[in-house]
Image: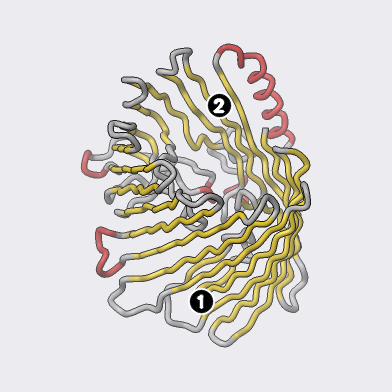
Amino acid sequence: MKKLIAMTVILSAFAGAVYAQGLSFGGYFNSGLGVISIEDQDPTVRAFGVDSESNGYRFRFNGSYQNEERTAGFRFRLQSQRSVTGSVQDFYDDTYTFPIPLSIPFAYGFMNFFENKLNLNAGIVDDSAWQTADWWLNDDVGEGLGVLVKLNNIIDGLSLGFGGYTISQRGGGDNNQLARPINFTPALSDIKYVISGSYTMKDTFYIGGSFRTENTSGSQTSSQFMGDFRLLAVEGLTAIVAVSLDNLQNFENAGNIVISETFAFKVNDEFNVGLNAVQFFYNRPTDLDPGFLFNLWGSYAFGDVIPRIDLVYFIKGQSNTSQQYHRRGYAATANNNEISVFSVRPSVRINLDSRTHLEIGDVVHFNNNAGTNIMTNVFYVDFRWSF
């Protein structure tokens, strides 16, 4: 951790020295502690970042550069966090020169042509232009090491993209590293190809999605479609419907369907309420019962102190209390057993300033697994700092 702090100081000093030359920098740190109690077991303490959904901690250092004409530049991210599995090997990986896991989730150059109507991105690409904005999926079909071509506003509001990637990044739980074993020379037919598009009618709606082909890029290898619809016409209302169709290469026997709805309403400057709902469907040779998750929440701000309450009921799903206790810390179960969970989470967020907050919360899970009821409780403190 001392080396991580030292690295942050050095990079921040470098940022200040070269900022005037067209470089800009920013970053993020999140960590916390939780006391986990499961029935009659002795309580355990876990280091966990609720905001980042990361075991231990998450640290990010972002940098970007563009020329005065804004026609070319470069973006990168350095990231350190513990793997989701939490093993010693994941934490002290001998492939790194630091005694902490350090990765480069993205590092790519970009060029803009024809008044930004054509963009070319090359390197370890991570572009969120077609990422869904819902609560549960909040993702796209992925990028990686390769090239992304984007067309912007050829027709007002229309955005198109085409990418080809030889290696994918792993997920956030694996520190967004490039997938191993690394193969820099796959066959042309094995590359991950991604086609994306979206259309926005100003102050009315947004619709977008992306599709990837089956590939051998090491991660995100199935054929998948992901997209969402957002209503923009009602002030104060968030209304999003997103969908994921996975394993399209064998959809009749192995298809996974996730539909996610996100609704929130800003009653006034202090009071917010919302409902997140998710449905899980499975195409299998044997019929499997679908899963249904409901998350009802509300918050009220007393200046910089914001109490909040979350209620969750998940049919055919369970909590991930033993590993993760963030707000999406649940897993669907693809079987026909009697499985469900009900959760209550009171919490309070304290904004120390516009970039720093502290969250104190307690989440109680009532898991029902085939008639066996297990109650778990996690009291936690979470800290987030952006710079």
Does 87 sit left or right of 6 as displayed?
left
Tell me: residue 66, above or below residue 369.
Answer: above
**Could one spot residue 214 in this view of the protein?**
yes
Find residue 220 and report its horizontal and vertical position in percent. 37, 50
Crowding at dot 2, Cα within 10 Å, few <14 / some 14-19 / many 20+, comes out as: some
Residue at label 1?
315
**Residue sitting at x 50%, y 84%:** 338
Crowding at dot 1, Cα within 10 Å, few <14 / some 14-19 / many 20+, comes out as: many
SS for tag 2? strand
Find residue 40 and report its horizontal and vertical position in percent. 75, 78
| Labelled disc at residue 197 | none
Does 375 sit left or right of 149 as displayed?
right
Q: Nearer the viewer, mark 1 or mark 2?
A: 1
Find residue 124 and report its horizontal and vertical position in percent. 42, 33
**Residue sitting at x 55%, y 26%:** 63
Amino acid type, label 2: Gly
The mark nearer the N terminus, 1 or 2, is: 2
**Could one spot residue 163 in this view of the protein?**
no
Kindly report the distance in space between the C-alpha atoms of the residues bearing marks 1 and 2. Answer: 43 Å
Amino acid type, label 1: Ile
For the N terminus, give its image quadrant.
Answer: top right
For the C terminus, give its image quadrant.
Answer: top right
**Outermost left residue:** 189
Find residue 173 and report its horizontal and vertical position in percent. 54, 51
